[in-house]
Structures are given as C-alpha cells and as structure tokens.
Image (tube, coloured by chain):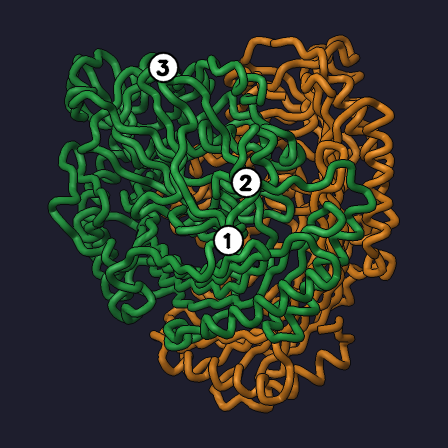
Chain colours: A green, B orange
Amino acid sequence: MDRKDFLRNTAMGMGAFMIPRSMLHATPIEVEAALNGGMDVAIKKQLADVALAAAKAKGATYTDVRIGRYLNQFVITRETRVQNVANTESFGVGIRVIANGSWGFASSNNVTKEGVARTAERAVAVAKANAKILDNPVQLAPQKGYGEVSWKTPIEKNAFEVPVKEKVDLLLAANAVAMKGGVNFVNSAILAVNEQKYFASSDGSYIDQDIHRMFPNFNLIKIDVATGKFESVKSLSSPVGMGYEYLNADPTQKLGGVVTRYKNRYDMMEDIANATESVKQKIKAKSVEPGKYDLILDPSHLMLTIHESVAHPTELDRVLGYEANYAGTSFLTLDKLNTKKFNFGSKIVNIVADKKQYGSLGAVGYDDEGVGTKKWDIIKDGILVNFQAIRDQAHMLGMKESHGCCYAQSWNDVQFQRMPNISLEPGKEKLSVDDLIKNVEKGIYIIGDGSFSIDQQRYNFQFGGQTFYEVKNGKIVGMLKDVAYQSNTQEFWNSCSAIADESDYRMGGAFNDGKGQPGQSNAVSHGSSTTRFNGVNVINTARKI
Amino acid sequence: MAILNKAQAEQLLKKVLAFSKADECEINLSGSEGGNIRYARNAVSTSGGVSRSSLVVSSAYGKKLGVATINEFDDASLEKVVRRSEELAKLAPENPEFMSFLGPQQYKESATYVPATAAIDPKLRADAVATSLKIAKENKLIAAGFMENSAGFSAMMNSHGLFAYNTSTGVDFNVTLRTEDGKGSGYASKSYNDVSKLNVDNLTKVAAFKAAGSATAKALEPGKYTVILEPAASVVLLENLFFAMDARQADEGRSFLSKPGGKTKLGEKLVDDKVTIYSDPQHPEMPTATWSGDGRPQERMSWINKGVVDNLYYSRYWANKKNAKPIPSPDGIIMEGTEASLEDLIKGTEKGILVTRLWYIRSVDPQTLLLTGLTRDGTFYIENGKIKHPVKNFRFNESPVIMLNNLDALGKPERCVSGESGLSALIPPMRIRDFTFSSLSDAV
C-alpha cells in the first residue's frame, strides 16, 4: 500500500482510516452540491467528440477522453466530538493519445469545447515530443467500440444522500459504547466515494459510469495506567464497493466464532462492543513465544497478505521493470510464467483476478481505457498461469486483448495498469474454521490486519495483525500479543494446507494501493475464506526502550 | 494562475477578505507550476506538466467553522467561495477544539526560492534523463528513474491582521540502475531547492557503482551487526521518531514518549549524548518555510539536545490547554555530526555492514517505535576497515530509540530525502552497534 499516505495518516493520527492524499486535497463542496447530477451525459458526449476530432486533426491515431467528477465525503470523530466533516469535489478532463507511435497525455479543469480541444492538442504535442526518443512504438491491443453504454455500482442507498447528522449520530453512539466499556481513546469515521466517469475513445465507445464505495471504521486504544503500556484494536469492517446499505446489520451476513465477523453487511454497534472487550483482553494477553506455528488466517487479515505477496508481484509492469525505481520489480518473471510449471503455492491454491465481483472496491463495468471487465486465473492449482495486463501490454503476453485493469485515480492523472481484485478461491471441500483449528497442535488464529512490510521483489515479508488467539491441541486457549510472522512468498503459499469452504468467504480491501511516479492510489478488494498455513516463523515484537 | 508576487497576493487576499461577514475569516492562497519525466527499461515512459492553484477560505462563527475552496479568481467566484464557507460554518457542529485565528506575526524572509530552479523547462529534464541513460547504457546497466520540479508561492491573510507570503522551488531526482542479469542494483536520490546543486551525472554514477558492486552478493546469517547507515538509509528510521514527537500523543499516554501515570519523557535523556537534532528554516544547506500552514512562525528549534528530549510539537489547541508554547512541527530535520567522511567510518570498522538504503519501513509497535523494513540497492560487508564484498539483503526489526542508544560514531551531515515520506533532512552517516537483522531476503 502507499507509503506516503501511510506516514501522513499515521502522523495525523488517522492510521486506521488510510485515506489517500489525493482525496484529502480535492476541493471541498457543500453536501447539496454532491447530490446534483453534474454535467449532462449528452453534453459530455459533445465535448468528447470535440476532443476526439481535435486530436485526430493534429495527427493522433488513437484518442481516449475521460471526463471525471470525483466526490468524497469524510465524517471523522474522536470520543465525544466531531473532528471533521468534509465534502470534496474534483472535476475535469484527461485526454490520452497515440501520435507518431508514442503516448501523450494532458488534462484540464476547463471542460468547455475550447478547453477540451486545446487539451487534446497539448496531448498530441506531448506524444510527438516523446516520439523523438522512442525505440518501440506503442502496440495497442484491439478493442471494439461499445457505442453508448452505462454502468452503475449496484447500490441500494447512496451514501451521499444520507444526512451527515445520521452518520455523526452513528459514530458518536459507537464511540460512547467503547468509552463506557473502558477504552481510553476511540477514533471513528465514515468515508464515502463516488466516481462519475465518462469515457469516450476513437474506437467508438461512449461509456458513462457511476461508481460508489464506502468505508465505516474505528480504532480503539486501551492504556494500562500502571505500566504505561497501550494496545489498539480496529474495526472488522471493510472498505466496500457498496452504498450505505453496508451499514444495515443483517444476521444472515454474520459469522460467529471467537468474535463476530461480517460479510456483505456490517454491524458497527456490535463490532465496537466486541472490539472493546478484545482490546481489554489484548492488553493483558500473554506475549508470544517465538517459533514455528501453524497459522489460521481470517480473511480480514489474509487480504493484506494476498495484496502484498500475490497481487503486487503479478502486475505486469513490475514484472517488466517499469516500477524498478519506486515500487520495485517482481520475483515472478515472464520465464517463470512461460514454463507453465512454476509452483507458486500448494495444489489447493487457486487465485483469481476479478473486476466484476459484487461489493468489491475494484468492480466496474469498463476500465479506464474502455475495456469491458472480466475474471481470469492468476494461480491455478498452485501454478502461475497469468499476470495482469492492459492494452499496450497484452502483446507482451501473447494475448489479443487486455485484461481490463487500467485505472487512473483522477481525471488529471494518466491511466496505467493497476491491480484488479485478486482473491483466493474458497476450498472445494466442506470445511469450517473449527475444522481448520481442530487438528492444530501449536498454532495462532489471527484476525484483522496490522503492520506489513515486504521487499521490492516480493519474496520476504512480515505481517502483524489485530487480535491473536493461541491454539493448543485443536482448541483456542487464550489471546496472545506481540505477534508478527515472517516468510518467503513461495514458501508461504506452498505451506497452505487447508482453506475453509465458500460459506466463510469474505472480502477485505484498501483505498490506498500505491504505485507510479508521481504516485497514484487505487482501491482494491481481496477475498478469501479462512486459510491455514503450516509451520510459519513467528517472532516476538516486544522491546524495551 | 501565474505565480503571484507578494503585492499581488496581498491585493487578492484583501479583496477576498472584504467579502467576509463571519466572526472570523482566514484565507490561504497557493499556486505552483512544474513538470516531471519518468523513465524505465532505458527509455522515457511518461512525462507531463503540472499546474495547480487553490484558494481556501475558512469562516468561523463562534466555534463553528466552515471551509470552502475554489480555483477560479474572478470577483463573482471569490465572493461565492466566501459565502459558501459562511453557509457551511452556520451548518457545522461546534468544534470544542477550534482556536480563534492568530493575529499579526513576524516572519523572517525564507530562502526557499531559487530562480534557476523555477526556470527548469522540459528540455532540461529531457537532457538530464539523456545524461543518465547514457551512463546506464555505457555501463551495460538498465535504468529506471524520475525527475520532478516545481516552483510556487503560498500566502495567507486573516481578519485579525495576519499576512504571510512565501515562494519556494524544488527539484527531485532519483534513479535505480540494475545489472542486465538482475543480480545487482544501485540507487541514488537527491532533493534540492536549488537545481545548480543537482548533479544527475554524479548521482547516476553512484547508482551505477552500487549496481555493479552489488551483483555478487553473498548471504550472511541474520543477527546483530555493527552497521554503517548512509544518510538515505537512516532518514527513513529517524523520521519515524520525529513524526512521533507530538506532545498530545505523549500526554495522552499513547506514544513512545509516554510514561506511566500520565507523564512524558520531555526533558529526559532518551538517546546517546552524541545525538543532537534540531530544525532551522534559515539553514543555508536546507532552507524551509518560515511559517506553518496556520500562520505560526517557524523558528530554529532544538528537539533532542545531547540525547535529551528538548521540545515536542503542539497543536495550538493542545498548547493552550497545557499552557505550553505552541511549537509547530517543522518541515525538515537536521542532525549534528562530525567532520569524518563515510570512508573514515568504514576505515574505523573492524567488522560491519554498510547499508545504503532501507525500504518499506513500517511501524510494528508504536510504544517502542519498533520498525521493520529491508535493505535494498547495495548492502556491503566491511572487514578490517575495508569493503570486502556485497551481501544479500536483510529484513531488520529495530527501534530508532534503541539504535540511537547504540550509536558508535557519526560522520559529516549531508542533505538527503526520505524515499518513504519525501521529508528532506541533513543527517550524518552513522555507525551503530548491535543493529538487529531478523531474516534474509532474496530480493535484488
């Protein structure tokens, strides 16, 4: 995930919220303005046609136009008070062209006929300048035009239509539960996102999309006054590609067990009561004995391990070296893919990329270069079978079409390859979490994600978590603390010994998947069922200063 | 919007302020222009121009605050943004932590604007990249890099008579060179206000030297080692200590500076006597802004003096509540050193490891500031005062507090930039005893 956002959010005391900087820097607007429809789609088409014609007239052989309106709302509280309520808006146009075989890009917030024509011309000028130092012309995978089409996130209740007061009341009521339960500090927030994106290209597509995402969350801190020690526990909610209906508690979307976990509906009041008990238990918990343990990882935790160790190393731009100076390269190479035998994980490991999955952050109808989205295999029966590629990369994998995973964080950033939702398929056998635990002699059951770090080629990683339950002889015997595990990606996924069935499947996600220079944030989900990994190295993170 | 001079900015801000009907009003105005170029696989991949401007109006009625922004500057738009901020303030819940805006302040002139940097054009960027690519190709290495520059101004004014204005420029360059077989990698990075200090040729050569020199890395067992950290490596650890020097977090008991019973370590010995860290907006090697975003003057400030925690930074609200001086967090950190060179430190090392870059730094435990991360782009074994051979990368688990207690020697400070946060710092190379490497990585 994005490092600068992480540092900034941590410094602002918002570590749990992980709000990308691009959102914080957008223009504040009033609530009502977020609800008007913005520019009419017929006008967007007219403007797009102006841009397409202007680029073509200057010599572009391909053009795409993105007219985007990006809305965010933050409601942020601590303990008994509201810290911030902000609505932000960003509106403008980004135009990308191919001229003389090279890409060119320009953007503007002047979304008029004159403005878009001038922006198109600037994009062509950039392309022609870049073409002078170009070795290999861009090879764009063909893409049929879709004509005039639209897509909308299937929401039941637009989060922007819910009054701020209702959100504030929910957060302050949740905070009160935690404070009454004896925690020392509580931060909570609701973040809502709406991307209104209009895409047109010289292939003949005019695509209007209305994309919604939201994230309710909290973080609790308990201090032991006598020792000065403190511990934190955060919410088990996920950022989701849904509307406000995510907050409609639904018993059929809950999973029992050591603590209640949530599928497509979240119960904030219940979760904060549970987390209050968890943080009090955590501060008194036994410090872990380092050594080898079987790890049983809840989807709320495993999502981050999947993100870092599977989703990033299978990005084709990293594989090829385009990110060598920043995010890094990948231990996975074209050679390893081409052998069709590279043993990424154990035979039960099946990992898919999916840009259509309901409720996910990455779900869209079409990507940001006009390709209809799809689902494809990345790891099949433990073997590496594919990467993530967009239109100008498809030929490098011998493919005739893009995977449809091109994305730009805003109209003023150029689109590039970003990870789709990457998820571990549930186990095919009927298997519950209890089944996963019952044969474990010495293990740790981890719920929630914590500290995370991985090397620039994605071999060596270290992950913490939120709550850690000690498993002895098939039973949960109590809570542990100071736990982190270290492993090597290939070794780790080959130690995968059991995956719970579909009934346990859930998604986690992040708004701040970072890549590129200048950096851009991407929102992405990772699903799995609870999964067991045998014999993983656990370290103790307690120190004295 | 063009970059406004002081008189133009003042005139515009006065015009905006004249529209205000709120109890209090404060306006922040900024604009910048710049560009970037990115290259990878020995060819330019993307480039672009960036122009930004923003006018932020904060209006307050009592403790109710509303904020609105606009990037159009005609009179109607300026009045509209003031009215909108006032409407938002009337609707906002009371914020008990709201502090009335500051009155007039005295600021020193800042030295953050360099005309030569403001004059950087696409050709200069392209020429720099061509220089870097030439060195890469001559050495049979594969280059990926990024150069970015900007010039801008910021100004603020409020209804209590405060006015502040500043201009600044910046240029960043970073490059990674890798051997064709992928076994060696080297990195160099610098950030300056003044482009005349940027030597792309030299930086690319440093990265090339490290790439070629790291290709035959041998594995050493993880464990505790004496390490020499180059400034680009130590800055990413020290900034985590620095970012956590917030008084409120310490007072509230949720910081590495908290003590049992609600006390803090302010005024106490925290690290080795050799550690002195301060900030100084007027430092000739690293000038920074002379005022913070809320109008507080940025002055020379001691943070750690001979190992003792000298000052913490405060929000205005928390300083008022604690009856403390409202010291803002600074824009850059400076650590004192000696006249010794990096080579001198290596010469004085019997057995140790030279770390040139650390990466993917994450907090593991905020109460001890335990961090994890990895070495990257050139790590070397030192024996009897000489670099013997490159070593494979390590993961470390270490706290900067423990590390600065195990400080053995310091060299001459040099300007560096954090690869994690972008923070600029003047930091010496340092030799540390018993630095904890917890596992090996195969990554190059």
State the CA–CA distance, disc 3 to disc 1.
41 Å
Q: Quadrant of residue B281?
A: bottom right
Please, which residue is most extreme toward the left here?
A251
Residue B84 location (% of width, % of height): 47, 82
Residue A367, placed above or below residue B240: below
Position of residue B402 in the picture relative to residue A281 (left or right): right
Q: Check if mark 3's residue and mark 2's residue have beta carbons within 8 Å.
A: no
Position of residue A82 in the picture relative to residue B233 (left or right): left
Element at badge 2? loop
Q: Earlier in the sequence, mark 1 or mark 2?
A: 1
Q: Earlier in the sequence, mark 3 or mark 1?
A: 1
User: Could you tell me which residue is drawn at 30 percent across and 36 percent down?
Assistant: A300
Same-chain status of marks 3 and 1:
yes
Residue matched to label 3: A346
Residue A483 location (% of width, % of height): 35, 26
Q: Residues within 10 Å of mark 2 (few under 14, many from 20)?
A: many
As shown in the figure, which amino acid type bears the numbered disc 1?
Gly
Element at badge 3? loop
Q: Is residue B279 visible?
A: no
Which mark is drawn over residue B421?
A: none
Residue matched to label 1: A145
As shown in the figure, which amino acid type bears the numbered disc 2?
Ile
The number of numbered badges drawn on the structure is 3
Return the chain for callout 1.
A
Q: Nearer the viewer, residue A215 or B168?
A: A215
Same-chain status of marks 1 and 2:
yes
State the CA–CA distance, disc 1 to disc 2.
16 Å
Which of labels 1 and 2 is toward the front? Answer: 1
Residue matched to label 2: A390
Position of residue A83 in the picture relative to residue A399 (left or right): left
Q: Quadrant of residue B49?
A: bottom right
